[in-house]
């Protein structure tokens, strides 16, 4: 039981950098950071026990009885807040990426993997600005899957669009096909990937709706949790096929739309207030 | 008579070779299973040792498809499980990369001259947990009802069905 992960993993348990977040609830956030750190310290000595005690690993094939999706209320998304982005980065080990020594900041900005980005929209007629987090939209009819020559880009039965890195050849057709700029290519050797998120050079990747959480029986995503923890509650995760789910009820009662609905992709990520 | 003696001694030599080979194999097993790893304290691997030697790649390959495409995470043939059980630890308490040339995967693959590509993408030490600390914390939260209800989503006052969504 000596082989623990704690010494290898300095970034995950540490409190988030408060300067990155302009949200109002810093004390709660700091507390959550400490709580997360404490949890890490407690569970670290028993890697196996941790996996058994908390997760409920899936034993049956995913089915199309569910379709996972997100609803984003852009009215509640706060300008300058990056909590969801940071949470996504930490969940998936993207915060462990490092700039190559010979790379300029500008080049690094365009090349590092980004699964979730904040986008600011301005209505040029009225001047109204809205903020929204933009990730893979988990299209029902995903163009990325249509163009993939190897079948690596695929849609799981429960609607999650993913890349099977074992078969991805890194051609990046899917990146060009995606209307949402949702996908990233890994340009350099990765040394410090997380156990729950394998990722390596030469493959394309994108938001997978926290698929390891899905398969361990948890009921939310990192971005939605982080947003809720700050009190913004702008992101709601849930099952679009379950009429009783929170997301289905919210979709029934508030106006929402798909980004680029003209493309008829029937996205699993919906936006209100835009 | 002379022929019989030669025959007996040939058999004896053969037996000695078999014994020697088995000793070497046992020695190998001890060398590759790292002292201090969890595996060193286990009576058996997830399948019989000789079967694992020859077929571990098939098991992992099968599991990879069922995990990636069908979301199945409960089976015992996971690469994360191999790493977790076979990783060894330095005297300073640091887990050592399992594909290092003197480590469990690396040593045998170096001996058999087969490249091991798994760790281009997969973590070569247990790192970060199967669930993130944030997920573990939020999972505790979830039982306490911290997730927004449909009514709370969009509303400024936390509480059941008081927001626009619930009110309409
Ligand atoms: S948003 Fe892009 S990456 Fe995601 S499913 Fe649609 S086309 Fe594919
Ligand atoms: S980069 Fe990979 S996932 Fe994308 S189209 Fe090419 S092979 Fe398919």
Image (cartoon, rainbow, N blue to C red):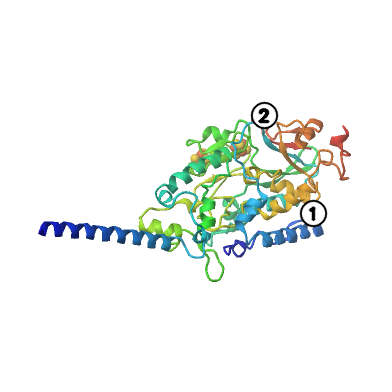
How much space separates mark 2 and mark 1, taking CA atoms?
Answer: 34 Å
Q: The residue tagged with tag 1: helix, strand or loop?
A: loop
Closer to us: mark 2 or mark 1?
A: 1
Label 2, on which residue?
Answer: A262
Label 1, on which residue?
Answer: A23
In what quadrant of the picture does the C terminus of chain A appear?
A: top right
Expressed as whole percent of the image width and height from the top left, the position of residue B142 reads 76, 47
Name the outermost residue toward the bottom.
B91
Q: What residue appears at the point 44 percent right and 57 percent down from the top-left corner?
A: B105
Quarter of the image where one finds residue B150: top right
In what quadrant of the picture does the N terminus of chain A appear?
A: bottom right
Any part of residue A175 in sight: no
Depth check: A64 or B1 in front? B1
Specify which label sits upstream in the sequence, 2 or 1.
1
Expressed as whole percent of the image width and height from the top left, the position of residue A263 reads 64, 30
Q: What residue appears at the point 26 percent right and 58 percent down from the top-left corner?
A: B15
- Is A172 left or right of B53, judged from the image as shown? right
Relative vertical location of residue A38 with respect to residue A154 in this rendering, above or below: below
Expressed as whole percent of the image width and height from the top left, the position of residue B10 reads 19, 58
Q: What residue appears at the point 77 percent right and 47 percent down from the top-left corner?
A: B143
Report whether the residue tagged 2 is closer than 8 Å to ligand 1: no
Name the outermost residue toward the front.
B1
Crowding at mark 2 (Cα within 10 Å: few <14, some 14-19, many 20+): few
């Amino acid at each position: 039981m000596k082989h623990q992960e704690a010494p290898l993993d300095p970034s995950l348990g540490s409190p988030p950098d408060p300067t990155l977040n302009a949200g109002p609830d810093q004390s709660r956030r700091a507390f959550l950071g400490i709580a997360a750190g404490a949890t890490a310290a407690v569970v670290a000595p028993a890697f196996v026990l941790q996996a058994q005690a908390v997760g409920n690993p899936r034993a049956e094939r995913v089915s199309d009885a569910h379709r996972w999706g997100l609803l984003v209320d852009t009215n509640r998304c706060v300008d300058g807040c990056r909590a969801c982005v940071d949470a996504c980065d930490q969940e998936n080990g993207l915060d462990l990426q490092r700039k190559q020594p010979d790379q300029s900041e500008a080049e690094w900005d365009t090349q590092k993997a980004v699964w979730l980005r904040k986008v600011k929209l301005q209505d040029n007629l009225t001047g109204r600005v809205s903020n929204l987090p933009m990730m893979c939209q988990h299209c029902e009819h995903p163009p990325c899957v249509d163009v993939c020559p190897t079948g690596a880009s695929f849609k799981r039965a429960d609607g999650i669009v993913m890349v099977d890195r074992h078969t991805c050849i890194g051609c990046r057709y899917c990146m060009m096909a995606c209307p949402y700029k949702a996908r990233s290519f890994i340009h350099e050797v990765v040394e410090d990937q997380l156990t729950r998120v394998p990722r390596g050079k030469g493959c394309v990747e994108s938001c997978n709706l926290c698929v390891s959480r899905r398969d361990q029986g948890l009921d939310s995503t990192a971005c939605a949790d982080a947003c809720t923890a700050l009190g913004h509650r702008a992101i709601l995760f849930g099952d679009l096929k379950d009429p009783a789910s929170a997301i289905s009820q919210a979709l029934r009662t508030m106006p929402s739309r798909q980004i680029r609905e003209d493309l008829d992709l029937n996205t699993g990520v919906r936006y209100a207030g835009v | 008579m002379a022929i019989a003696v030669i025959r007996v001694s040939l058999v004896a030599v053969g037996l000695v070779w078999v014994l020697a080979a088995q000793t070497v194999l046992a020695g190998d097993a001890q060398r590759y299973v790292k002292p201090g790893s969890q595996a060193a304290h286990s009576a058996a691997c997830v399948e019989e040792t000789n079967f694992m030697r020859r077929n571990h790649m098939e098991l992992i390959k099968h599991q990879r498809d069922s995990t990636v495409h069908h979301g199945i995470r409960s089976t015992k043939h996971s690469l994360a499980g191999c790493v977790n059980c076979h990783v060894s630890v330095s005297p300073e308490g640091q887990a050592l990369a399992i594909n290092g040339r003197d480590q469990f995967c690396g040593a045998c693959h170096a001996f058999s001259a087969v490249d091991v590509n798994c760790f281009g993408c997969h973590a070569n030490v247990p790192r970060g947990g199967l669930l993130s600390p944030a997920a573990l914390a939020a999972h505790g939260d979830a039982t306490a009802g911290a997730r927004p209800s449909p009514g709370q989503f969009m509303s400024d006052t936390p509480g059941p069905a008081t927001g626009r969504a619930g009110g309409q």
